[in-house]
Image (cartoon, rainbow, N blue to C red):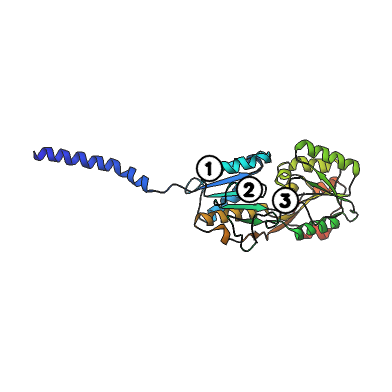
Amino acid sequence: MPGMRRREFVSLFGGAAAAWPVAVRAQQPPMPVIGFLDPTSSDSSGDILRAFRQGLKDTGYVEGENVVIVYRFAENQFDRLPELAAELVRRRVAVIATFSNGAPAAKAATTTTPIVFITADDPVKLGLVASFTRPDSNLTGINFLNAEVTAKRLELLRELVPAATRIAVLVRPANTGTETVLTEVEVVNASTSREIDAAFATLARDRPDALFVSPDPFFRNRRMQVTHLATRHAIPATYALRDYADAGGLMSYGTSLTDAWRQVGVYSGRILKGAKPADLPVVQATKFELVINAQAARMLGIEVPHSLLSRADEVIE
């Protein structure tokens, strides 16, 4: 009988030991999930994603270790954004991080899931937040361009090309916040790769003195095409993001997109820790950079003034 009791004890202890790890695992909360909603493609978002992950890391979150990121890319099919946003909401993600193009779709999909956006337009005018200081909703984010920056781009362009009086602007029609500071310009629309080709055919015929390219994610995703056509048709063009200058564009001036996305990552991390979007003011980007592509200038027959070269954050030779 004592032996029997011993065997029963060993059996019970063994069963408890086997069950113990399962019980411990069951007590561990699941990792929070962030939804990353991008209107473009994964191919063009590598630097953005690295910056976003760095912002998360700055707040203590590392993908795969204590946070999961679910990616949804619209592949430049902007009409898919509402469907992708709704899918992330059904997935019950803790936060949705998105470009301005995806923010209205995400807002329409949920009034409770926190949304952190990045936008080149005025988020108050877009109806995303009540004010910069008190968003008063489930949305907040980073505003990385405004009328003052656009005016500065125009000033730099005229310094680079003093004779420029007729300026065209390339826009995507659905982007409602297009370069509102620019008046009396020729507006050329494009929403597809073919329409970009057609737009530059129009520009080649009309011969404006210079071109503004609006800061739309669609054009950023097509920056190789845009900068190549501007050079091919000998049109001095200015851009809002350094990616274009890196791709062969003449000059860029604007915020550091990677720094802005790092801040999106920081806000996402703070929300995971309990902060409410309504209490997080919309951040206006403060890091700006002027990049000049000297090789592109030579191809266009433009001599870059020393005053511009000395102020440039980088000159690409």
Q: CA distance from mark 1 to mark 3?
A: 36 Å
Check disc 1 and give the amino acid type: Arg
**From where the camera sits, is residue 197 visible?**
yes
Among the two numbered marks 2 and 1 on one chain, the one whose residue lies closer to the N terminus:
2
Q: Position of residue 134 (x, y in %)?
A: 61, 63
Among the two numbered marks 3 and 2 on one chain, the one whose residue lies closer to the N terminus:
2
Q: Determine the residue positioned at 68% across, 41% down.
A: 78
Of tags 3 and 2, which is closer to the observer?
Answer: 2
Q: CA distance from mark 2 to mark 1?
A: 25 Å
Residue under pointer 2 = 48
Local SS, label 2: helix
Check disc 3 and give the amino acid type: Arg
Q: Quadrant of the N terminus?
A: top left
**From where the camera sits, is residue 292 visible?**
no
* Circle 1 crowding by C-alpha within 10 Å: few under 14, some 14–19, many from 20: few
Q: Determine the residue positioned at 73% across, 55% down.
A: 254
Q: CA distance from mark 3 to mark 2?
A: 13 Å
* Circle 3 crowding by C-alpha within 10 Å: few under 14, some 14–19, many from 20: many
Q: Quick one: which residue is furthest to the bottom in this view?
A: 133
Residue under pointer 3 = 242
Report the front residue among 55 and 298: 55
